Amino acid sequence: MTLLIYDCDGVLVDSEVLASEALAELMTSLGHGMSAAECAHIFGGRSVNDVLARAGELLGRPIPDSLGKEAAQQLMARFRRELKPVAGAAAAVAALPHPRCVSSSSAPERLALSLEVTGWPRCSDRTSLAPRR
């Protein structure tokens, strides 16, 4: 049996650019100016905890928990407004006959929101990933 496992961020949904832009804004506001491209290179694919730890290292001080939570909430609001599916992902997924699922290092809340906003249904071990029509 073949099972296709997709990552979400950057594969099904175009979230990496938005996340990098938001992180660049946060780092700049904390006194360490960074571009979105620099943030993508340094922080891309990391969990929230890893991002906050690395950001703290770059700043020379830890990021307060309250600021990290506020930044996460702002990113989720940005996702609700701006997140789009990756062009061609729905057609590619639909064209393959195998069962499929999503695996992600993103927090479950972020994953669920990303899939919902872009029209991908949430999956369980009994459903396949398929775009809503």
Image (cartoon, rainbow, N blue to C red):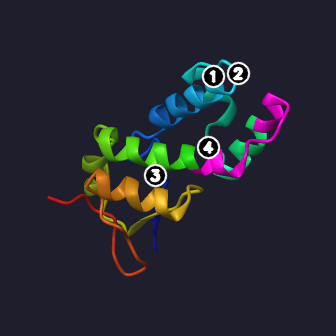
Determine which of the numbered discs, if any, sits on residue 8 in the image. 3
Residue 34 percent across, percent down from the top left: 64, 20
Task: Identify the secondary structure beneath mark 1.
Answer: helix
**Label 2: how many Cα within 10 Å (few below 14, some 14–19, many 20+):** few
Q: Nearer the viewer, mark 1 or mark 3?
A: 1
51 or 7, which lies in front? 51
Q: Contact, CB < 8 Å: mark 1 with mark 2?
A: yes
> Which element carries disc 4, helix, strand or loop?
loop
In the image, taking residue 41 as reference, residue 60 lies left or right, namely right
Q: Say which residue label 1 marks.
A: 28
| The stretch drawn in magenta includes residue 61 | yes
Which is nearer the eye, 34 or 31?
A: 31
Give the label on residue 45, or none: 4
Q: Work out which quarter of the rendered image holds the C terminus and state it.
A: bottom left
Q: Is residue 92 above or below residue 31?
A: below
Q: Which residues are magenta?
A: 56-69
Q: Earlier in the sequence, mark 3 or mark 2?
A: 3
Mark 4–mark 1 CB contact (< 8 Å): no
- Residue at coordinates 47% horizontally, 56% vertically from top-left? 110
Nearer the N terminus, badge 2 or badge 4? Answer: 2
Q: Decide: is 117 above or below 2.
A: above
Provide the major secondary structure of the magenta segment.
helix
In-image side of 128 versus 21 (left or right): left
Q: Is residue 125 left or right of residue 93?
A: right
Mark 4 vs mark 3, CA separation in Å: 11 Å
Kindly identify which residue carries mark 2.
Answer: 31
Element at label 3: loop
CA distance separating discs 1 and 3: 27 Å
How crowded is the residue under tag 4: few (<14 C-alpha within 10 Å), some, or many (20+)? some
